[in-house]
């Protein structure tokens, strides 16, 4: 979609205190920052995640907004949130996309990104 410049950055963190090798439970938090560098506001409408375990098994997650919100992100603004993923292996990959509504043209934009945990 022309005229939109959206940057997504992700910072993962292993949560050792919440993880357990004996239970094959590996908890990661991740902080996502969505920076709207465009001249128009966007609303984060939906998310899509594909979570792939180190074993190759994967699952897909779809839903409205993020952390219970569908935030409006104005020109030059950032929206930041933290969430978590629980894996069955100590390594994995999350990749996904956000569906953003351009409030100027009312068009939808998919913003893909990858997260290595």
Image (cartoon, helix red, strand yellow):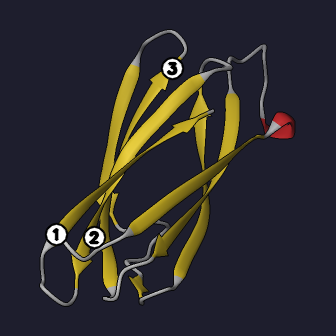
Assess whether mark 1 and mark 2 are in contact (beta carbons under 8 angstroms): yes
Task: Look at mark 3 in the image and give the residue it sits on.
Answer: 53
**Label 2 environment density (alpha carbons within 10 Å; few <14, some 14–19, many ≥20):** many
Secondary structure beneath dot 2 equals strand
Q: Residue at x 59, y 52 (%)?
A: 10
- C-alpha gap between disc 2 and disc 1: 5 Å
33, above or below 63, in the image: below
**Residue found at x 36% / y 80%:** 38
Q: Tell which tag, 2 or 3, sits nearer the viewer.
A: 2
31 displayed left or right of 60 = right
Toward which corner of the image does residue 52 lie, by quadrant? Answer: top left
> How far is disc 1 from disc 3 in space, using C-alphas?
30 Å
Residue in the picture at 59% in, 71% down: 80
Q: Nearer the viewer, mark 1 or mark 3?
A: 1
Mark 3 crowd level (few <14, some 14–19, many ≥20, 10 Å Cα): some
Check disc 1 and report the residue beneath it.
108
Number of marks present in the image shown: 3
| Residue ID for mark 2 | 100
Residue 24: image x %, image y %?
A: 68, 17
**Residue 33 percent coordinates (x, y):** 57, 65
Q: Quadrant of the C terminus?
A: top right
């Amino acid at each position: 979609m022309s005229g939109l410049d959206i940057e997504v950055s992700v910072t993962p963190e292993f949560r050792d205190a919440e993880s357990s090798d004996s239970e094959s439970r590996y908890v990661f938090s991740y902080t996502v920052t969505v920076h709207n560098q465009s001249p128009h506001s966007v609303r984060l409408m939906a998310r899509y995640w594909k979570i792939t375990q180190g074993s190759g098994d994967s699952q897909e997650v779809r839903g409205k907004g993020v952390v219970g919100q569908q935030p409006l992100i104005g020109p030059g603004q950032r929206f930041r949130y933290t969430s978590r993923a629980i894996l069955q292996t100590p390594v994995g990959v999350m990749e996904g996309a956000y569906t953003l509504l351009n409030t100027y043209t009312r068009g939808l934009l998919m913003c893909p990104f990858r997260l290595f945990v």
